[in-house]
Image (cartoon, helix red, strand yellow):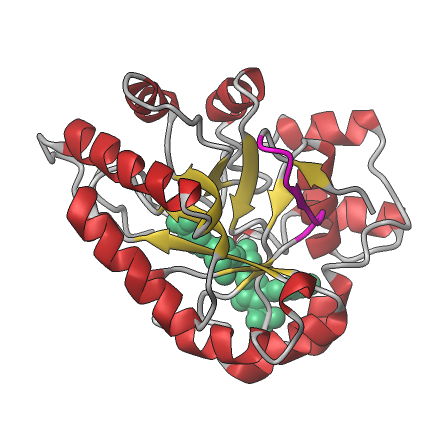
Amino acid sequence: MKEWTLSNGLSLPAVGFGTYKAAGEEAVDAAFESGYRYFDTAAFYGNEEAVGRALTRQPREQWQVATKIWKTELGYDKAWASFEGSLRRLGTEYVDVLLIHWPKAAPNDPDWQRLDRETWRAMEEMQAQGLARTIGVSNFLPHHLENLRVTANVPPAIDQIEFHPGYLQEETLDYCRAHGIQVQAWSPLGRMRMMGHPLLVELAEKYGVFPAQICLRFALEMGVMPLPKSSDPRRMAENLALSSFSLEPVDVERIRGMEEAGWSGEHPDRERVML
Ligand SMILES: NC(=O)c1ccc[n+]([C@@H]2O[C@H](COP(=O)([O-])OP(=O)(O)OC[C@H]3O[C@@H](n4cnc5c(N)ncnc54)[C@H](OP(=O)(O)O)[C@@H]3O)[C@@H](O)[C@H]2O)c1
């Protein structure tokens, strides 16, 4: 299956493994066994030690790990402290990808622009020192990315956003395409909220696959790297088995034209909506 090539030249596999609430070492061991080689974690998930214990049993060149700086840890000094904690908990000398988890500590934080730029300055140093091979962001909309551009020397290589049928954030996708930023999809299955949607069920029947595979193949067709999470080895394998089919352009357009559905309720500039 295809790989993604980032603006800094690093290659990432087509599909990564999401570890939020998959947590345990066994899940990561099983995911590695299933063939996953890219693992998405975050300081906030509280599972870096478990993820690190499972991954460091394998040769370092065989896996990639991404972690994130939580939104309360923005700013030059706090970002460094957060990242040093992540490295220690993961038990690795470097991470492959380091992201700012959210652009703001709170929707009305008046200081977010300065804090994001300072965090980025620290991350540029981490990259220059070989501690983070790639630096990027998560949940950044175009205006948050524009803010970084004012002082950045290194552009973000990745933006990880909520993306699944029913919630595509196409404005951010367009911006990222135009600026060479690889988009990654969090909740690429809409945390199962979309699994019973009639269009996805219809397409699953048409292609002889599961609705989850329609969601993931759709991400690939849109140039987006999905990060599905599963605690079940059978579903882990299912989520990697995407090379036997591709969606016809007309079906990609039908999914793009779906009504808005399955949103998590999280948005960087608004209070969380409990759905
Ligand atoms: N950057 C951010 O702010 C952010 C936010 C949220 C998530 N993330 C990242 O994105 C990853 C994925 O997102 P997510 O965990 O929210 O949601 P998701 O991957 O869209 O959905 C996970 C849910 O789908 C189920 N599932 C998995 N494969 C399936 C299949 N083939 N058929 C049916 N159901 C299936 C899982 O259940 P089982 O486990 O029982 O299989 C789980 O309940 C996270 O783990 C995390 O790494 C990032």
Please tell me whether residue 3 is drawn above or below residue 114 in the rendered image: below
Residue in the picture at 34% in, 24% down: 152
Segment tinted magenta in the rendering: 8-15
Quarter of the view holding residue 221: top right
Q: x, y (%) of residue 21?
A: 45, 71
Q: Is residue 28 left or right of residue 20?
A: right
Say which of 172 and 182 sits in front. 182
Q: x, y (%) of residue 128?
A: 42, 40
Residue in the picture at 37% in, 73% down: 89
Q: Please check the rendered image and state whether residue 12 is part of the magenta-colored stretch, yes or no.
A: yes
Our reading of the magenta stretch's main secondary structure is loop
Q: Residue furthest front?
A: 129
Q: x, y (%) of residue 46?
A: 34, 71
Residue in the picture at 64% in, 34% down: 9
Q: Please check the rendered image and state whether residue 200 is part of the magenta-colored stretch, yes or no.
A: no
Quarter of the view holding residue 60: bottom right
Q: Quadrant of ligand 1?
A: bottom right
Residue in the picture at 55% in, 15% down: 178
